[in-house]
Amino acid sequence: MKNSIPDLRAERGWTQGDLANQLRVSRQTVNAIETGRYDPSLPLAFTIAKLFKRRIEEIFSP
Amino acid sequence: MQAETRQVLIGWMRQFGLTMAIYLVALATAAWASTSEAAGPLRTTLILAPILPGLVLIGLTVHSYHLCDEFIRFRTLQAAAVAAIVAAAFSLVYFFLELLGLPRLSAAWFSNIVWAVFVAQMLRLIAIGK
C-alpha cells in the first residue's frame, strides 16, 4: 500500500523518530510503513490520519 | 525514544536482570545439589528451585512482547516462526546424516542454531531505518 506519510512528515519538519514518538510506536515501525514494507492496522492508520488531520484515504492508497 | 518508554524499558531490564541473576544462582545451586547433596527434601527443593525464577523470566519476556508495537510484535513472531522452521529442517536433515555416521549432537546445538537464526533476524529488524 502506498502512502504520503513521508511528504506529510516533511511538511511539518518531523523526523521519523518525532513521528514515532507521537504515534507511540518504534522508529522501525514508521520506517516500515513509509517504505511500504508494512501495512498498519486500522487503529494505527486512524491514529496517523488524526495526527495529520487528514482522512485515511487521503494518506493511504492501494 | 520517549522518556516514558525509556522508563518502562529501564524498569523491565532491571526486573529481568534481577530475575536472571536469581535464576543463575538457583541453577548453580541445583547443579551442586544434584551431585553433592544426599537424597532428601532439601536436595529436591534445591534442584527444583530454578523453576520459579525460570517461569518469572518467561512471564517477563511475554510482558515485554506485549509492550512492543504491532510491527515489532509481527516481526518477532515472524522471526520465531523462521527459527522454528530452520530448526525443524536441520533436525530432519541431521537425523539422516546421523544414520550415515555423523556424530550425535546434543540439544544445545539445536538451541544455539534456533537462537542464532532468531537473533540474526531481530538484529536485522533493529538495523531498519538506521
Image (cartoon, coloured by chain):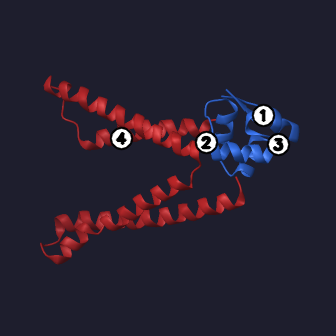
Chain colours: A blue, B red
Quarter of the image containing the C terminus of chain B?
Answer: top right
Q: Position of residue A51 (x, y in %)?
A: 78, 47
Residue B93 in sight from this viewpoint:
yes
C-alpha span from label 2 to label 3? 22 Å
C-alpha span from label 1 to label 3? 19 Å
> In the current view of this chain or complex, which residue is farthest to the top?
B100
Label 2 sits on residue: A41
Task: Classify residue B24 as left or right of residue B78.
Answer: left
Q: How packed is label 4: few (under 14 Cα within 10 Å), some, or many (20 or more)?
A: few
What amino acid does circle 4 point to?
Asn
Going 41% across and 34% down the picture, which residue do you hit?
A: B82
**Chain assignment, label 4:** B
Residue A25's mark? none
- Label 1: state its secondary structure: helix
- Label 2: state its secondary structure: loop
C-alpha span from label 4 to label 2? 34 Å
What amino acid does circle 1 point to?
Glu
Task: Classify residue B111 as left or right of residue A62.
Answer: left
What amino acid does circle 2 point to?
Ser
Task: Classify residue B55 as left or right of residue A36.
Answer: left
Label 1 sits on residue: A58
Going 74% across and 41% down the picture, which residue do you hit?
A: A16
When asked about the image quadrant of residue B116, the answer is top left
When asked about the image quadrant of residue A52, the answer is top right
Q: How packed is label 3: few (under 14 Cα within 10 Å), some, or many (20 or more)?
A: few
Q: Position of residue B41 (x, y in %)?
A: 17, 77
Q: In this rendering, do the residues under marks 1 and 3 share a single chain?
A: yes
Label 3 sits on residue: A14
Sequence order check: which comes first, mark 2 or mark 3?
Answer: 3
Which dot, 4 or 2, sits closer to the camera?
A: 2
Q: In this rendering, do the residues under marks 4 and 1 share a single chain?
A: no
Proximity of marks 1 and 3: CB atoms separated by less than 8 Å: no
